[in-house]
Amino acid sequence: MKKKLIIILLVPVVELFYSCISCEDPCRDIVTKYGKFSHKELFLKNLDNSGEQIIETDALQINKNAYGIRLNLIIEKINGTVRLKAANSIFFQSAYALSYDCPPEYIYSAVDCIKSIKIFTLQDFDSQHSENSDITDYFKLSGLYEDVQDFSQTIGYTLEFDIIEYLDTPFHIDILLMTAPTIENQHQFKVQIELSDGRILEQETTKIELL
């Protein structure tokens, strides 16, 4: 009876020993690199939402019920801010060992955030909105159909990858026109993005005929 009892007690101890080894090994040598980035530039593209998927377009005419704007944001790395942190500290072991998820190799944080996004019409749009009027409320975020201003308050500003590889690849925000114009057909829009450091990124779309 004693031999059987000893066997029963040893089995879970052995299993615990091997499970602890497997938890520690994947993340033991990872060193996380920290850095900073800033929003650098904005450029715009007209969108056509009349098909199965939204597409960028250089067409001169678009269905007024299927028009949108793509906001392309370019970021830049802030030099001299990268620091290292060993992933095999007590904190990282306790946080990641049980979940098998290793900490990221890179964590970049923004030095500025988007305070507001505004869209202006550069032509008379309807009876309530003449040239240079703010028509931000006429646009919704693609997919979620969320208000543009609400979205600008919920954007995340931490990137867990090496941004060096993506500095020339813009992060884009697609917004769709939900209220069609009732005055004229030729239209053009201006987008302003106000950043927390006081800068304003501003661009105009190409002229488009909304039919």
Image: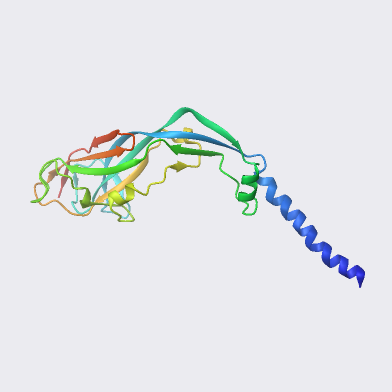
28 to the left or right of 199: right
> In the picture, which quadrant includes the N terminus?
bottom right
71 to the left or right of 124: right
Where is residue 184 shown, x and y percent of the image?
Answer: 9, 46
Position of residue 95 relative to residue 191, above or below, is below
The extreme right residue here reads 2
189 to the left or right of 128: right
Identify the residue shown where x is 86% and y is 65%. Answer: 7
The extreme top residue here reads 80
Where is residue 97 shown, x and y percent of the image?
Answer: 65, 50
Observer-nearest of 114 and 204: 114
Where is residue 176 shown, x and y percent of the image?
Answer: 26, 51
Where is residue 99 shown, x and y percent of the image?
Answer: 61, 54
Identify the residue shown where x is 66% and y is 39%. Answer: 29
195 to the left or right of 1: left
Position of residue 147 relative to residue 35, above or below, is below
Position of residue 98 relative to residue 4, above or below, is above
Observer-nearest of 201 and 81: 81
Position of residue 3 relative to residue 113, above or below, is below
Q: To which quarter of the image does residue 98 belong?
A: bottom right
Observer-nearest of 82 and 41: 82
